[in-house]
Image (cartoon, rainbow, N blue to C red):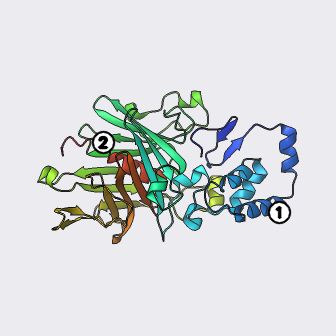
Amino acid sequence: MAASPVSGEVVRRDGVAEVGTGTEGEEDRWARLLPELVAEVVRRVEASGGERWPALKDVVSCASVCRRWREAAATVVRPLPESGKITFPASLKQPGPKDFPIQCFIKRNKKNSTFYLYLGLRNNLTVAMDKGKFLMAAKRFRWGAHTEYIISLDADGLSQGNRAYLGKLRSDFWGTNFKIYDSQPPYDGAKASSTRSIRRFGSRRISPQVSSGNFDVGQVSYKCNLLKSSGPRRMFCAMECPSVQETWENSLKVKSLRRTGTTVLRNKAPRWHEHLQCWCLNFHGRVTVASVKNFQLVATADPSHPDSVGDEETVLLQFGKVDSDFFTMDYRQPLSAFQAFAICLSSFGTKLACE
């Protein structure tokens, strides 16, 4: 989960990194240890202050020794929905915890149109602006009438041919409708998009471990108010969210992926503050700068999606500005970090129909 892979590292589909820097004899020696002993070692490493980053890197190192150690780590480290901790890269596509949000922040680099997502290590925003655990990055590209954001685990490998490629966000000409594509199928039987402009030609030739398709997992739409810039924008999202029932062990064995239905989100309506003369939302201290980009998303029941469930009070994703190029992003179940990041990226683009 570093900004760039270490020498000899291979990122597997299950999200656990394999490091091939040792000799085969060394790996055999570690693999010959009793599974019970290996599990106890990993358990003690996690218990010895490894609850948060940077201490969690010791658990990741254990999982990188060999296959037996990786399997032991899978039985000890609980998935994100249960533990509330982001440990392995696979956690980035698992739903967040239900009872509290995962607090992250985004740093923007306007010069090269890149965006970096970090896991917040502390609640203090001033400290968080300088520190954090890198999770993923995105780069904006202009392709004719469309804009695309390529999302990757590698901050230096922001292309679809890179094995660290996670997915993409694609907008229409007006910048008001977006589609989110995942590099991996969200469920068994999902079909990759057949649109020519988004096929990943040659990706298998570059790396056989890279998926050759992009799978539609969500849509984001913006609707402008009648007063144009005098009022807030309205957002609508329809997401194919990851299954909460999928256990960590099953995700490692890649047995099956069940379809969970569509989650429909809309932005929480702000209230007009007479004294401040502006539209306001309560971000509980996580947002300090007024911006049209700021939003909070809640689940809503939609007649066109019979399986959708509404909850107007629980904020599932909030995004807001703290400094000129610093933004907070807090998400929870049923969204994953990847989906939340993609939704937030849609807020950065120019909305020609609204501006």
Asked whether 214 or 86 is in front, the reply is 86
Q: Closer to the observer: label 1 or label 2?
A: 2
Quadrant showing the C terminus: top left
Which residue is located at x 61 percent, y 56 percent?
Answer: 53
Task: Confirm or deny contact between disc 1 and disc 2 (CB under 8 A).
Answer: no
Residue 145 versus residue 329 in the image, above or below:
above
The numbered mark at residue 349 is: 2
Asked whether 110 or 143 is in front, the reply is 110
Nearest to N terminus: mark 1 or mark 2: 1
Residue 291 versus residue 164 in the image, above or below:
below
Which residue is located at x 34 percent, y 29 percent?
Answer: 143
Which residue is located at x 48 percent, y 42 percent?
Answer: 137
Taking 207 as reference, is 237 left or right? left
Q: Position of residue 232 (x, y in %)?
A: 21, 56
Instruction: State which quadrant residue 225 falls in.
Output: bottom left
Q: Secondary structure at mark 2?
A: loop
The amino acid on which the numbered mark 1 sits, given as a three-letter code, is: Glu
The amino acid on which the numbered mark 2 sits, given as a three-letter code, is: Gly
The numbered mark at residue 36 is: 1
Extreme residue toward the front, this view: 126
Taking 277 as reference, is 316 left or right? right
Asked whether 63 or 265 is in front, the reply is 63
Taking 80 as reference, is 109 left or right? left
The numbered mark at residue 267 is: none
Q: Secondary structure at mark 1?
A: helix
